[in-house]
Amino acid sequence: NAGVTQTPKFRILKIGQSMTLQCTQDMNHNYMYWYRQDPGMGLKLIYYSVGAGITDKGEVPNGYNVSRSTTEDFPLRLELAAPSQTSVYFCASRPTGTGVRQETQYFGPGTRLLVL
Amino acid sequence: AQTVTQSQPEMSVQEAETVTLSCTYDTSESDYYLFWYKQPPSRQMILVIRQEAYKQQNATENRFSVNFQKAAKSFSLKISDSQLGDAAMYFCASPPMNTGFQKLVFGTGTRLLVSP
């Protein structure tokens, strides 16, 4: 198992450009998440998905879009990049779990994005 | 509103000594997991330990253990016999208030410094 993979590892964008951050997991997890981590801070949830075709907003969704057409993939789209989107982006996935308890989230290695 | 609080931005410990990192949380869930993640300089998020809230017994994983006080909503991480490789950012995470079990909220982190 490769686990959760993210591409690219690092990217520089100009203001106003768009890009897609890729996330793939091979663990057949239904739940997938996108977080951003600003310098010296914790993780903030951007979007999440509970299964193919189902997505929902997190704490900081503005400026981003997601889609979930397959169980494995959960791309994050940045439209009209702004300097405030300079951050490290993490994708995570987890199994459904039993009952209503949270299960462990497994993280990708992150994508560092710099918007200039 | 922030539901996970890590009040220690930075902690220092000497090799072989013991250190405790504190975390308080607030959730409306009655049955949940709590998590501690480690983030070394590589930025990879690594699960350290998790606690099941319905279990009274504190979780342990080798040199890592928790002190879980459910009524006080406190979830501290104890690292025994500290090693240089323990130096990292540590984040605790819990389910947020009033939004079910699908998401986690992360604290702002504690940087652990380990000296020889």
Image (cartoon, coloured by chain):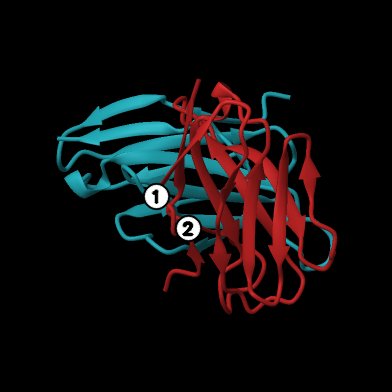
Chain colours: A cyan, B red
Relative placement, left or right, of B29 versus B60 is left
Question: x%, y% of residue A88?
Answer: 37, 38
Judging depth in this view, the residue of B34 and A52 nearest the camera is: B34
Rendered view: A79 above or below A4? below
Name the kind of residue labelled 2 in the image: Gln
Kind of residue indicated by mark 1? Pro
Residue A13 position in % (x across, y down): 22, 32
The reply to whether label 2 and label 1 mark residues of one chain is: yes
Q: Residues within 10 Å of mark 2 (few under 14, many from 20)?
A: many
> Mark 2 touching mark 1, by CB under 8 A?
yes
CA–CA distance between discs 2 and 1?
A: 7 Å
Above or below, comparing residue B23 to residue B38 in the picture: below
- Left of A94 or right of it: where is A9? left
| Side of B78 where A76 appears, left or right | left
Q: Which residue is mark 1?
A: B9
Task: Kindly identify which chain the residue marked by label 1 belongs to.
Answer: B
Q: What number is the disc on residue A61? A: none
Q: Is residue A81 visible?
A: yes
The quadrant of the picture occupied by the N terminus of chain A is top right
The quarter holding residue B58 reads bottom right
Q: Position of residue B108 (x, y in %)?
A: 42, 53
A15, above or below B68, in the image: above
Disc 2: which chain?
Answer: B
Residue at image x 55%, y 59%?
Answer: B23
Q: Nearer the viewer, residue A50 or A111?
A: A111
Which residue occupies the foreground of this view, B55 or B43? B55
Question: In terms of secondary structure, where does tag 1 sit?
Answer: loop
Identify the residue shown where x is 69% and y is 77%: B71
Residue A68 in sight in this render: no
Tell me the tag on residue B6: 2
Q: Residue at x 46, y 31 (%)?
A: B43
